[in-house]
Amino acid sequence: MKTTFFNEMYEAGGAVRPHYQAYAEWLTATPAERIERKRAEADIAFHRVGITFAVYGEESGKERLIPFDIVPRIIPANEWQTLHGGLRQRIKALNAFLHDIYHDQHILDAGHIPREQVLNNAQFRPEMMGIDVAAGIYAHIAGVDLVRAGSDGKDGEFYVLEDNLRVPSGVSYMIEDRKMMMRLFPELFSRHKIAPVQHYPDMLLENLRTVAPLGVSDPTVVLLTPGAYNSAYFEHTFLAQQMGVELVEGRDLFVDDDTVFMRTTRGPQRVDVIYRRLDDDFLDPLAFRKDSMLGVPGLLSAYRAGRVTLANAIGTGVADDKSIYPYVPEMIRFYLGEEPLLNNVPTYMLRKPDDLKYVLEHLPELVVKEVHGAGGYGMLVGPASTREQIENFRLRIIAAPEKYIAQPTLALSNCPTFVESGIAPRHVDLRPFVLSGKNIDMVPGGLTRVALREGSLVVNSSQGGGTKDTWVLED
Amino acid sequence: MLSRTADHLYWMSRYTERAENLARLLDVTYQMSLVPKSVAAENQNWGAILALNSLESRFAEAYDTVNADNVLRFMVMDPNNISSIYSCLRAARENAHAVRGTLTSETWESCNMTWLEIRDQKFEQILSSGIGQFFEWVKLRSAVIRGVTFGTMLQDEAQHFIRLGGLIERADNTARILDVKYHVLRTNGDEGATDFYQWGALLRSLSAFEVYRKVYRDVITPARVAELLMLRLDMPRSLHACTRGIVRVLESIKNGQSAETERLAGILHAHIHYARIDDILARGLHEYLTDFMDRIYELGEGISHDFLMPAT
């Protein structure tokens, strides 16, 4: 199965796409040594600033740099308009879904989603039933993964791969990449009208303040981190600093009389909104995992009493679970009465015997993912795997088919990227960050991740992925 | 400010200062060892460093004999020795890492760079390029971190806790260095040229040689060295300067439960402020310094209890 991929920069015939024209001219006119020097400069700067991430499974505490590529991913204004509308629609529906299943469950009564799919889902939190969260918002921050598929001949269409409604990360790279590009190549920014992204922390803070508990006029917002050994710790410190809020760990907080306080050098101080970068399971050892040293005993109780806002809410995982993903278009029709603007990837659910049979017969063509997996761990990319890897995976599927879904291997679009041999096409995705509070909004663009290994379709930083600055052009 | 944040800032500063003073102590010991004397006497000097930090048993687990090479290896680059310069700089960096959002990027970067540089070094390399040069590097890095911190950070609570950590550690360390070296020098007891070099090395290690000349304009005598390092308010590493700094910082960060700690600091400061070196020497310098270190320890406990790890 030989596929030609959609290329972000070049048309099928090799001509430069209009929105890359100015960049291509600059690239041709700029001496290779200058670019090489700038790449080295970027490397040193990232190391010095310590923009690193920890890799699970490697020597503990070891940090790696996420490779940064200097060829930007450019999105024309009209294309972004479509994405923007589609993302708003999707996140609106997902928030409506979360509110519904934790209240009246109309969508289940209407038979659009099998009841047991939701209620037996490990991510469904019965503790949330009947709780009214501030402004009715559950997923305050969503990191929606989009890919552009399709081949050269056709216009590449965007597909939503995952919704990521729990604790999506990567937004700090979006901002740092932009800062780096402006530092390295200021002249490019005078040649293009590029929509700014650096105000994201302001938007985030404003968004968090609007969802404070009722009656709190000047809310104290904090960012709750699992701690310095978390892979996204850099981002936690970055966002807390940019927003000017305290970066707290569980041990900095305590609950007294259903009110959350932080321990300060001047005594206890009340906390109203917690932007938590800690999974549900670890939030409160009294309610969830008892062995969690990272959480705050009594937090759930304070939350249920409406004395503190958690962003994102507890129990959002049920809406971004891979077994629920296939129903999102249905949610959009049900709650909004609209047709989905963004495509879903066709998905086989291996708990269904027919789907299982088909998938087992077509493993070399498909991508198989664990329902609850994330970060590119525990997945099989059929076309990129050896026979042995496929057969090993087959055994895992047969052992527990309900734990897996499968999708056709998407021909992820390519974007020119610097590699050892020069500039070569590499596969990219796009993660815009959608904020929901009183309104739904986002900064233009998002984080573009790039699979640096030739032919690889896995863009996760834990699997050798890098990032690019993402430009949304203004008309 | 979060108590935990204050705790990390305080310890970042203590560990950086500790690494610097350890470099100073090892440097003076090394300098003194260059003056000819018996092997036994020299090894005794190196042993004193271990005793000073209560590290004899831990040292004995990994090394068989106490000599210059082993003690230096143990105290400079041994990652298993939590008191080595290597470990101190790592701990300083880990504390900084935990609160990097509170630091200016310059402060974080200088702390991180220091760690990255020492992490990649080998002890043999350090020896072959001159251990003195390495000690200079440690002192310089500490000075850079301190300079960048006070030159770039807002003069708020964060800075108070950084200053406090540095002062507590420095007070303790100056007392320690003086205690161990004064004792060694007094018991070796040979007058004349050797003595001059030895006292000179001690002063230099505390950056006090030129200061001494300027203040006393006279030959070096043990009593004056002690006075300079303990009682002179204008000598930045003296016990007096440190305790006064501690009292002042506590004044700006005091809270509802810190009255007792402030009182302890005030007493300690007054004690030094009104002391005379003749009285101290007559009563016994070692006893005096031991008592001082105990009180500094107590003060550290009080600070932890009142500000850094408050009970709820």
Image (tube, coloured by chain):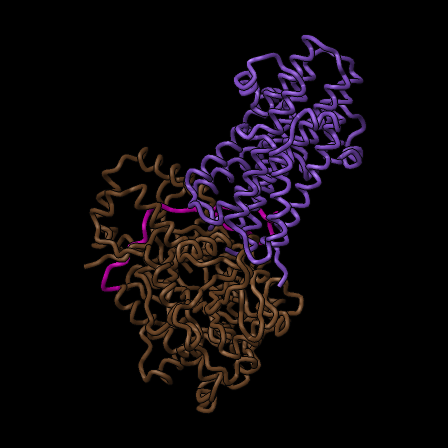
Chain colours: A brown, B purple
Residue at the top extreme, as displayed: B193
- Residue in the picture at 80% in, 26% down: B65
- Residue A405: x percent and y percent? 52, 71
- Residue in the picture at 63% in, 61% down: B311
| In front of the other: B221 or B171 | B221
Residue at the bottom extreme, as displayed: A109
- Residue in the picture at 33% in, 75% down: A89
| In front of the other: B16 or A8 | B16
Residue A127 painted magenta:
no
Q: Quadrant of the C terminus of chain A?
A: bottom left
Residue A69 painted magenta:
yes
Q: Quadrant of the N terminus of chain A?
A: bottom left
Q: Quadrant of residue A18?
A: bottom left
- Residue A279: x percent and y percent? 54, 66
Q: Is residue A78 above or below residue A471?
A: below
- In this rendering, does residue A398 appear at all? no
- Residue A162: x percent and y percent? 44, 68
Residue A95 left/right relative to B65: left
| In front of the other: A266 or A325 | A266
Q: Quadrant of residue A332?
A: bottom left
- Residue A62: x percent and y percent? 57, 46
Residue A12 left/right relative to B302: left
- In this rendering, does residue B129 appear at all? yes
Q: Write the start and end of the magenta stretch as one range.
A: A52-79
Residue at the left extreme, as displayed: A475
Q: How many circles with numbers are drawn on the protein?
A: 0
